Structure formats: structure tokens, C-alpha cells
Image (tube, rainbow, N blue to C red):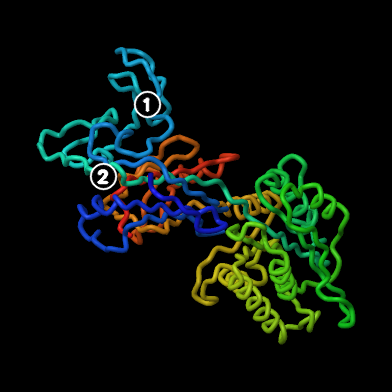
């Protein structure tokens, strides 16, 4: 058995295998004497992520045979499930598997997946067969070389709703009709049937801050009505929005600064959780120092707000900008710069999307798009995987296999496993998803 030692509180495991040296030496550019150990550690890259644990498992060789399941160590759970191989019998194997002649389920290959290895080809029905070339490579004789199964679960994103409570939110929506902008925003968020907070409260940590300020420079600024960020926070946010009305000014930049400070004082329990501010406002910002800037002073208020948004991103918090109304009616340049600042892009040349909603339906759709996008579908590997060997990996979501190239790819850096849209959707839709990636020994460069 390989030696397994825990590397820290993040549940990473290091797998050391002295016998691995003989296997790795058979691959080009794998003769680094320091490469006697394997370290697999996954982390997510952008704002809905995966918390991960690594388990050292059985040992095996790089795949070269006719069975896809036998070429992956340890095999996926569905491998070798009993099935009926009789001609015409229904296929009782899971999706992505077929029944072999000996009555066992085997993972199906794909024409471009590369799962069959040298000297074999994939048939139309997903089976690896000898291609007749006689060039099949013998398995590497390394019985103690470990493969690693990596398991992960969805990390819960943290979303702070920063909502404009200025007096202009009483305006009709749209075109001075009913309902008010404020009413439409409240409905989009906490409608008891389809509000986005109602729908996602079990899977997203929500907090909510309403921001405003009075005209007098002697009064507090910003004035924030806050509900702390916790899971299943629908009732508290519903109560907050149901009992508040629009008030005075719009100190957006000062409010962003206050929320960034609050994130620092009350960080998420999971340090890998993506931190998000969703800013919804309907007008040009003012500041605590200048509560009612005129045309000459408004550019300074724009710049201050944009700079505070840049600081939020630098602190690890992405800011989404949602204009409640038509940004083209007043502040299109500021809206674009705010979106760029919130995503770490150049203020003037960036093209990050900003959201504008000119009616209640668009407002609901915008909140759904923004908050629904925080589940990431990229996975970082700490061990670099050779591009040539990536097809030999077996990736599954809740036990269902993903097909290399069709469902996932490996970036050129060898570190980033990227799920394609259909697989990403499956991950986001699953309530308690588990993603597994199994790479046989001999596929890691370092």
C-alpha cells in the first residue's frame, strides 16, 4: 500500500509510492528524481465552487486494453455491474455503459475520446477492439503504482444583495406606470413562488443590504439596513424587504466600501467560497461627502464609485452591476465602467457585461442570470496532467460518466479541467452533486 499522509485542514492527501518511479521512467520527460510522489489537489477557479477531498486507492497501469473500465484504476462504481448479455436483451447498464459478453457493464468509449489506447479503436457502439495494426502497447508492469480518485462536492457561493433604497426607486416601472421600481425589485427577489432568493436560499448563502443616506452631511452615511449572510435566509430577507420603502440618497461607492469591510470582518466559513456583490440601482451615484452632486461634480462621484468597486474585486469579491431601468437613458458609460471594475477589467477598454432591466420581467431574468452564474465549472489540478494522457482520465458526476472532449477538456496548462455547457448544467442542477476524476498512474508529469 502507498503511504498516505494528510497535508492540512483542507483534506488534501499526499500519495507517496516508491514503486511509481519504475512506471514513470517509461514515459518521456518523466525522469525527474523528485517525482516520486503524486499530489492531487483540486480547487475551483471562479465565483459556485467545489470543495474537494482526495483518496488514495488501488494501484494499476496506464490503459491500453479493450475494456475501458479495466483501464481505469479504481474503476467507476458502475463498472462490472451485472447485466444480461443475451442478444436482444434490454441494456440495464447506466447511461454511458454497455453490457459485455461476460455479463458485466463496461464504460463506453467514443470515437474521439482516446480511451482505447494504442493498437485499439472505438466502434460505433462504444467498444474498444483491436485495430489490426498489431501495435498495441503492453501494460506497464507497475502493480504498486497508485491511481487517485478525487471526489468533490459543491461549495456554496456567498451573495450579498446591495439594493438601492433611494427615493427614485418609487418611480413607475416601466415608463412611469405600475408597479414601482422598488416593488418590482422586491418581487423579483422574494416572490413566494418564483423569487430568486426563495428558489436558491437552500444552496446559496444570501445576505441583503439596503443602502441610502439623508441629505444632511451631519447624518449617518451610508445608512445600511442589513441582514447577515447565512444559508436558508429567505424568511429574513423577505421580512426586510416587505417592511422597507425607498428613502433618500444613493451613496453607492461608500456602501460598497462598507460591504467589503463587512466581508473582511465576517468572512465565509469556507475560504474557497466565491464572494459576490449584486448591486441593483436605478440612478447616478452620490457620495457621503457630496450628497447631491450637480453636473460639474457628478464625474467625481462616478470615479469614486468605480474605484471602490475595483477595490472590492481586489479583495476577492466580484461585483455585478444591474441597472433598474435603461442605463442608456442616463449613465451608459458609468454602467460599463462599473461592470469592468467589478470583474477586474480595464475600466475604459473592458467589455464585461452590465445588466439593465427596463421592466419587471427583465429584472427577474437579470437576477436569475447573475445569481445562477456563480456556480463554476472549472476545476484546478495541482498535479500537471499531460495533454496526451488526458483522454485516459475518467470523470463522473454522481456516477454518470462524462466523455472526454464531448463533456470535458483539459486546458493547455495541464492544470484546469473544464466542463462543457451540458455537463456544467448537470452539475449546477444537481442538489448534492459529486464529481470524481480518476487518472491512472503514469499520466502525471509532476
Callout 1 crowding tier (Cα within 10 Å): few <14, some 14–19, many ≥20: some
Q: How many labels, in total?
A: 2
Q: Report x, y in % for residue 306.
A: 63, 76
Give SS at disc 2: loop
Residue 412 appears in which quarter of the rendering? bottom left
Q: Report x, y in % for residue 105.
A: 36, 25
The mark found on residue 142 in the picture is 2
Q: Is residue 262 above or below residue 304?
A: above
Q: Is residue 304 above or below residue 404?
A: below
Q: Report x, y in % for residue 85.
A: 32, 16
Q: Residue at x 56, y 70 (%)?
A: 340
Sequence-earlier tag: 1 or 2: 1
Asked whether residue 405 is in view, the answer is no
Q: Left or right: 181 with respect to 220?
A: left
Q: Residue at x 44, y 54 (%)?
A: 14
Gap in Å between the C-alphas at discs 1 and 2? Answer: 23 Å
Q: Residue at x 12, y 40 (%)?
A: 135
Query: Which corner quadrant holds the N terminus?
Result: top left
Q: Residue at x 60, y 52 (%)?
A: 369
**Depth check: 268 or 4 in front?**
4
Query: Which corner quadrant holds the C terminus?
Result: bottom left
Amino acid at each position: 500500500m502507498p503511504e498516505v499522509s494528510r497535508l492540512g485542514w483542507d483534506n488534501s492527501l499526499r500519495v507517496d509510492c516508491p514503486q511509481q518511479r519504475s512506471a514513470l521512467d517509461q514515459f518521456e520527460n518523466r525522469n525527474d528524481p523528485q517525482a516520486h510522489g503524486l499530489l492531487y489537489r483540486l480547487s475551483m477557479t471562479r465565483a459556485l465552487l467545489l470543495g474537494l477531498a482526495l483518496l488514495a486507492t488501488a494501484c494499476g497501469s496506464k490503459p491500453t486494453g479493450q475494456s475501458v473500465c479495466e483501464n481505469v484504476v479504481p474503476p467507476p462504481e458502475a463498472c462490472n455491474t451485472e447485466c444480461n448479455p443475451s442478444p436482444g436483451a434490454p441494456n440495464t447498464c447506466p447511461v454511458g455503459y454497455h453490457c459485455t459478453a461476460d455479463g458485466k457493464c463496461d464504460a463506453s468509449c467514443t470515437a474521439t475520446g482516446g480511451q482505447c489506447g494504442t493498437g485499439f479503436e472505438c466502434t460505433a457502439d462504444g467498444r474498444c477492439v483491436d485495430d489490426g495494426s498489431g501495435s498495441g502497447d503492453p501494460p506497464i508492469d507497475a502493480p504498486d503504482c497508485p491511481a487517485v480518485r478525487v471526489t468533490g462536492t459543491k461549495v456554496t457561493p456567498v451573495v450579498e444583495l446591495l439594493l438601492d433604497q433611494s427615493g427614485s426607486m418609487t418611480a413607475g416601472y416601466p415608463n412611469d406606470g405600475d408597479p414601482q421600481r422598488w416593488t418590482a425589485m422586491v418581487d423579483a427577489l422574494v416572490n413566494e413562488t418564483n423569487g430568486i432568493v426563495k428558489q436558491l436560499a437552500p444552496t446559496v448563502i444570501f445576505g441583503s443590504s439596503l443602502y441610502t443616506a439623508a441629505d444632511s452631511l451631519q447624518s449617518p452615511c451610508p445608512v445600511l439596513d442589513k441582514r447577515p449572510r447565512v444559508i436558508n435566509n429567505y424568511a429574513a430577507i423577505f421580512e426586510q424587504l416587505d417592511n422597507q420603502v425607498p428613502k433618500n440618497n444613493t451613496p453607492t461607492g461608500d456602501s460598497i466600501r462598507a460591504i467589503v469591510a463587512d466581508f473582511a470582518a465576517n468572512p465565509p466559513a469556507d475560504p474557497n467560497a466565491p464572494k459576490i456583490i449584486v448591486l441593483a440601482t436605478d440612478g447616478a451615484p452620490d457620495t457621503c461627502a457630496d450628497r447631491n452632486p450637480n453636473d460639474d461634480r457628478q464625474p467625481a462621484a462616478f470615479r469614486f464609485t468605480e474605484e471602490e468597486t475595483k477595490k472590492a474585486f481586489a479583495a476577492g469579491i466580484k461585483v455585478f452591476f444591474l441597472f433598474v431601468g435603461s442605463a442608456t437613458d442616463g449613465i451608459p458609460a458609468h454602467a460599463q465602467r462599473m461592470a469592468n471594475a467589478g470583474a477586474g477589467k480595464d475600466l475604459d477598454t473592458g467589455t464585461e457585461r452590465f445588466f439593465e432591466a427596463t421592466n419587471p420581467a427583465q429584472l427577474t431574468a437579470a437576477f436569475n442570470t447573475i445569481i445562477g452564474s456563480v456556480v463554476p465549472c472549472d476545476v484546478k489540478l495541482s498535479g500537471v496532467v499531460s495533454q496526451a494522457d488526458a483522454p485516459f482520465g475518467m470523470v463522473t458526476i454522481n456516477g454518470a460518466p462524462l466523455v472526454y472532449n464531448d463533456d470535458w477538456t483539459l486546458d493547455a496548462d495541464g492544470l484546469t479541467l473544464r466542463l462543457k455547457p451540458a455537463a456544467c448544467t448537470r452539475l449546477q442542477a444537481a442538489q448534492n452533486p459529486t464529481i470524481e476524476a480518476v487518472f491512472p498512474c503514469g499520466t502525471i508529469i509532476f
